[in-house]
Amino acid sequence: MAQLLVVGAGLFGSQAAALARARGIDATVFDPGLPGAASPAAAGLFQEAWAGRRWREHFVRALPVLDQLYGLRRVHLTHADGTPEELLFVPPAAILDSAPVRQSVTAVGDGWLEAGGRRHEGWVYVAAGVWSNQFVPDVNVYGKAGSAFVFAGERPGAIRPIAHGRQAIAFVRDPGTTHFSDGAAERHHTADHDRQSLERAAALGLTDPPLARLWGRRPYTPGGPVFRRIGARTWLATGGRKMGTILGASFARRLIEDELTSPST
Ligand SMILES: Cc1cc2nc3c(=O)[nH]c(=O)nc-3n(C[C@H](O)[C@H](O)[C@H](O)COP(=O)(O)OP(=O)(O)OC[C@H]3O[C@@H](n4cnc5c(N)ncnc54)[C@H](O)[C@@H]3O)c2cc1C
């Protein structure tokens, strides 16, 4: 049976593995669970306007994949003046691979990788977020960090604009809790940024101490998201920035439908 080997169990790697399995391709995902991974912190929200004209094609390609694999959901939020706003949503908990091999990939070549002292052969998809440079240095990926906070109880969804393209949002990402995220994305993230985020949360009524702080580094790449064939049987994708849900889905489709199941592969 055809075999896909995935480096990284974030939104990029997990969606590629899930789509591969849905198309009858066996997929193994490797991930040691490094601190600072972006995907566990992600709210999982998206809308066409966030993709803009530049990345609209990714949005359009992503929707059917997200819907078929996980089911698209809608989140109802309210602005300060009572105006409603609806966003699309897939919880990261539904996407992230439930049973990755907890090993670090130590080397990648054309059609093989090494992990746990063993060599594995198959199609290779490097989806290692901000760690992608270790395999392909010229991808020049860098991180912009931010924290989300989890509060006890399910509060009504709320949204407040902060700046162009940036909002503070509180909503129920996972049952029994309220997830707060304000789009903070800093090359040098400090305690002061967390303090500002918590002040914005408090302005939405989230004043009790958070149950958890989810800190992650969003992968950015110069010139925009990257999907690259780096060998006859090896690919890399990263640069999910604030849109890892749709970019991960769009690139999963590109890998599985356009590359792996195309006649030339
Ligand atoms: C606070 C916050 C809120 C966000 N909200 C949203 C949102 O609402 N909607 C949205 O679309 N996006 C959101 N994002 C952005 C989104 O999280 C990222 O774009 C996305 O998670 C990137 O996914 P990834 O798989 O490329 O990287 P990651 O999630 O970082 O995954 C990379 C994985 O590779 C693994 N890895 C690294 N090196 C190796 C190795 N050698 N061997 C094996 N595994 C390795 C790491 O352990 C890691 O798990 C948010 C991000 C943050 C931080």
Image (tube, rainbow, N blue to C red):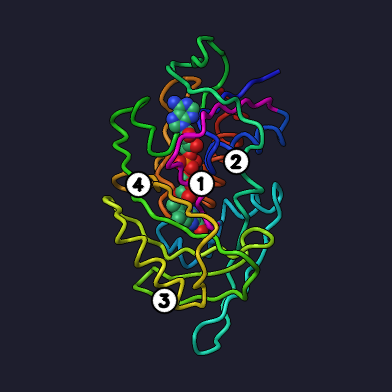
Labels 3, 2: front one: 3
Q: Which residue is mark 2?
A: 15
Q: Between residue 244 and residue 59, name the one nearer to us.
A: 244
Question: Could you say which disc has been placed on residue 220 in the image?
Answer: 4
Q: Amino acid at mark 2?
A: Gln
Q: Nearer the viewer, residue 92 or 200?
A: 200
Image location of residue 180, percent across then percent down: 51, 65
Please provide percent x and percent y for residue 154.
Answer: 65, 69
Q: Residue at x 35, y 64 (%)?
A: 195
- Dot 1 amino acid type: Ser
Residue 126 shows in the view: no
Decide which of tag 4 and tag 1 comes sooner along the chain: 1
In this rendering, is residue 155 above or below 257? below
Q: Are the residues flagged by discs 1 and 3 in contact, CB closer than 8 Å?
A: no
Left or right: 229 as drawn, with respect to 118: left
Some atom of ligand 1 lies within 8 Å of the CB belonging to the residue at label 1: yes
Q: Name the N-terminal-most of marks 4 and 3.
A: 3
